[in-house]
């Protein structure tokens, strides 16, 4: 189920980026800007599992990804580092902000004191279980190598969970897009390279929290694993990993392009949206029913198409003394996203998604986060 979750985020990106007018290359005719961040560097070697150097591996993979992306039309690549130099952690995210990037991808390798293995991708978040804290802690501790880190990080302590309160607020707006991007990369690597799936998860990485665009961190595998470490360190392994990361990014870009082309014309028919829904990759949330709320009114209207700008299948419920009018009913989040965009194009600009569990409303962001943790 995990890899199915990952591949199904294709439509989430396209709808969210279009609907919420986030920064997209197509919107302003600017190139699609990708900021690639090779973790560690210089005096910071990263982990040394099996005697390998994380900083060298991730730099090589990052440069390969960049080269493949630069060969594409209308793609611009910006690197936080292209050589073996040390870049302060607090500077990496802002580099992406300064160039108005569309996405930020940070590349790392994992380590553990066991023979743990597998590919994992992360979005910014403080998981309630704390199970991902140790992974983030290892990456965040690089701040101790920086000069005047007390001043730069305002007392932030990578060893203290309390330091992460409010840490994910900056990335909250881009959670869905970040999950989708992470998912496409994760799915490509797991399925095409037959690597163990450690899924898309959330963790409090400093490098992700200050960027103003969808941002993910990729852990290529465990250098400490006696089989996976040599694979990740090999030229063949690096090349394969770079190719799949690139393909994930390009699929993400493709979906933005498709969304802007498909929804340029505000006249979208019921038939068109129904056909699009049929072709949507599933993104099922078991036990959850999503609907699009069109309106709330004291007036009791017949939910027929003529009363709702031609929209079919509108339902009506009474709640807190008001009549609520909904479109759609599905446990598939991708489908409900498309439905929401459809009604917005029909004139219901303030329409939004609601979620129900056993007939009771539940918080949509919490439902979405449940898959990232």
Image (cartoon, rainbow, N blue to C red):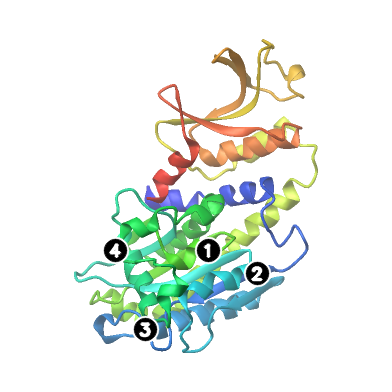
Quadrant of the rendered structure where residue 44 is? Answer: bottom left
Q: Where is residue 300 in the image (x, y as percent from the top left)?
A: 67, 10
Q: Disc 1 marks which residue? A: 210
Q: Disc 3 marks which residue? A: 234
Q: How crowded is mark 1: few (under 14 residues within 10 Å), some or many (20 or more)?
A: many
- The earlier-in-sequence mark between 3 and 4 is 4
User: Going by the image, does 273 lie left or right of 370?
Assistant: right
- Point 41% across, 46% down: residue: 371
Q: Disc 4 marks which residue? A: 134
Local SS, label 4: helix
Local SS, label 2: strand
Q: Is residue 320 above or below residue 154?
A: above
Q: In this view, does 122 lie above or below 271?
A: below
Q: Do the residues labelled 2 and 3 touch (CB within 8 Å)?
A: no
Label 1, label 3: how far apart the Cα atoms are: 33 Å
- The earlier-in-sequence mark between 2 and 1 is 2
- Point 47% across, 68% down: residue: 207
- Residue 198 in sight here: no
Q: Disc 2 marks which residue? A: 33
User: Going by the image, does 323 lie left or right of 263?
Assistant: left
């Amino acid at each position: 189920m995990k890899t199915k979750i990952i591949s199904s985020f294709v439509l989430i990106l396209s709808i969210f980026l279009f609907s919420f007018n986030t920064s997209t290359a197509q919107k302003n005719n600017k190139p699609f800007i990708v900021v690639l961040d090779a973790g560690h560097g210089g005096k910071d070697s990263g982990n040394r599992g099996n005697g390998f150097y994380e900083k060298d591996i991730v730099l090589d993979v990052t440069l390969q990804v960049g080269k493949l992306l630069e060969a594409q039309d209308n793609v611009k690549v910006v690197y936080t580092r292209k050589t073996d130099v040390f870049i302060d952690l607090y500077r990496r995210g802002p580099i992406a902000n300064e160039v108005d990037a569309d996405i930020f991808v940070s590349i790392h390798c994992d380590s553990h004191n066991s023979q743990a293995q597998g590919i994992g991708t992360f979005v910014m978040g403080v998981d309630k279980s704390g199970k991902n804290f140790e992974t983030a802690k290892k990456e965040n501790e690089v701040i101790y190598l920086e000069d005047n880190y007390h001043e730069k990080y305002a007392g932030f302590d990578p060893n203290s969970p309390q330091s992460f309160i409010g840490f994910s607020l900056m990335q909250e707006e881009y959670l869905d897009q970040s999950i989708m991007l992470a998912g496409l990369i994760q799915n490509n690597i797991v399925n095409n390279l037959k690597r163990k799936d450690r899924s898309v998860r959330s963790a409090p990485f400093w490098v992700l929290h200050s960027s103003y665009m969808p941002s993910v961190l990729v852990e290529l595998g465990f250098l400490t694993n006696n089989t996976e470490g040599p694979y990740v360190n090999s030229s063949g392994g690096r090349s394969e990993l770079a190719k799949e990361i690139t393909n994930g990014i390009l699929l993400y870009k493709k979906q933005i392009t498709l969304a802007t082309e498909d929804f340029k014309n505000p006249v979208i028919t019921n038939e068109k949206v129904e056909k699009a829904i049929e072709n949507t990759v599933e993104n099922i949330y078991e036990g959850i029913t999503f609907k699009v709320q069109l309106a709330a009114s004291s007036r009791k209207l017949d939910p027929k198409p003529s009363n709702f700008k031609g929209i079919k299948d509108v339902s009506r419920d009474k709640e807190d003394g008001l009549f609520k009018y909904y479109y759609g009913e599905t446990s598939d989040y991708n489908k409900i996203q498309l439905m929401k965009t459809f009604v917005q194009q029909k004139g219901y600009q303030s329409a939004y998604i609601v979620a129900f569990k056993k007939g009771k409303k539940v918080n949509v962001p919490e439902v979405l986060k449940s898959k990232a943790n």
